[in-house]
């Protein structure tokens, strides 16, 4: 849609909603006409009015097997006036609910989704992922089903792989070890499923930035903001010099935090940092020596 008048270049445009036109307030040129109003025909002045007058229903939810588009019989067992219904009617509604539930997961795909999405919600809850991340992961899992990537593979391993891929794509610092621990699936199995899904769906997954893990590590170790800032600076210098290539991002991030804590006199032991980062003390020592040598740091640890 034009942001200025093509005739006189004036940027002050008037919208006439009754006629469906956009008019230049300077020369009177009708820039657009016969425009459809895609909004509702009603107005609401508060959230209560909006809820009462809206007729479109809730948005699509990929976290639900039926995308939230199916009407369900509630379990309140009350009539429209709020009075309790008779036991005979309650038994009837119970049977209706049961058969409705069975009919809604009749196909193998629907059964697969019912199992997978409940597992996805469980893992995402433990990882503290927000709703939009869960929706993204659920959509990615549906793509896997559509591409027939689940056949012959454990549902739980594909779910874990999808969550890990979603975290990587959205820059959320969650390691493969964390996902493996919560899901109860071996790290090797999740890694295999992740690589397969990434290749088959041609996912554009960026390289993990070690700096994403620094706030998490410093918060767990109760370190100050200046330590966090210094660790990120060290990592940026390391990336410019190409020291990160071929090394685990968590190990490099942990070493940077270890060095920064010593620089500002908030020293933490290698064991403390290793426990928080989920790596070994040997890894931290090796990464620390590399960073100290290549960046010319004068730190005595």
Image (cartoon, rainbow, N blue to C red):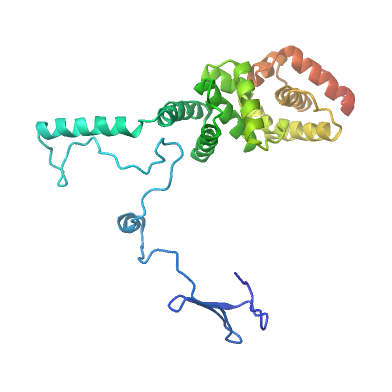
Residue 258's x, y, as percent? 74, 22
Q: Quadrant of the C terminus?
A: top right
Q: Residue at x 36, y 55 (%)?
A: 47
Q: Residue at x 57, y 30 (%)?
A: 162
Q: Quadrant of the N terminus?
A: bottom right
Tally of numbered discs: 0
Q: Is residue 220 above or below residue 54?
A: above
Quadrant assignment, res 179: top right
Q: Is residue 30 above or below residue 205?
A: below
Quadrant assignment, res 175: top right
Q: Residue at x 68, y 19 (%)?
A: 273
Residue 293's x, y, as percent? 89, 23
Foreground pick, 291 / 196: 196
Farthest residue, direction bottom: 27
Q: Left or right of 52: which side holds 181?
A: right
Quadrant assignment, res 96: top left
Foreground pick, 58 / 26: 58
Residue 94's x, y, as percent? 20, 31
Q: Does the rendering let one see residue 220? A: yes
Residue 205's x, y, as percent? 67, 35
Q: Does the rendering let one see residue 171? A: no
Q: Residue at x 57, y 83 (%)?
A: 25
Q: Left or right of 118: which side holds 257?
A: right
């Amino acid at each position: 849609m034009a942001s200025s008048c093509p005739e006189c270049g004036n940027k002050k445009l008037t919208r006439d909603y009754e006629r469906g036109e956009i008019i230049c307030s300077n020369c009177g040129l009708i820039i657009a006409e016969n425009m459809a109003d895609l909004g509702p025909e009603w107005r609401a002045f508060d959230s209560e009015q909006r809820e009462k007058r809206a007729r479109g229903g809730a948005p699509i939810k990929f976290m639900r097997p039926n995308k939230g588009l199916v009407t369900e019989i509630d379990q309140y067992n009350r009539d429209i006036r709020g009075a309790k219904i008779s036991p005979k009617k309650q038994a009837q509604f119970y049977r209706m609910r049961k058969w409705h539930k069975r009919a809604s997961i009749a196909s193998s795909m629907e059964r697969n989704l019912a199992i997978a999405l409940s597992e996805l919600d469980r893992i995402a809850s433990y990882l503290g992922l927000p709703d939009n991340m869960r929706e993204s992961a659920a959509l990615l899992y549906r793509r896997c089903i559509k591409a027939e990537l689940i056949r012959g593979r454990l549902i739980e391993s594909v779910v874990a792989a999808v969550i890990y891929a979603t975290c990587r794509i959205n820059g959320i610092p969650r390691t493969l070890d964390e996902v493996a621990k919560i899901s109860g699936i071996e790290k090797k199995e999740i890694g295999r499923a992740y690589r397969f899904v990434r290749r088959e769906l041609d996912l554009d997954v960026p390289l993990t930035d070690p700096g994403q893990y620094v706030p998490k590590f410093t918060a767990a170790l109760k370190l100050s903001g200046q330590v966090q800032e210094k660790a990120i600076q060290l990592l940026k210098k390391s990336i410019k010099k190409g020291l990160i290539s071929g090394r685990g991002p968590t190990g490099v991030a942990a070493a940077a935090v270890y060095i920064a804590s010593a620089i500002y006199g908030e020293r933490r032991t290698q064991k403390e940092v290793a426990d928080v980062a989920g790596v070994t003390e040997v890894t931290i020592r090796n990464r620390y020596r590399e960073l100290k040598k290549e960046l010319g740091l004068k730190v005595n640890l």
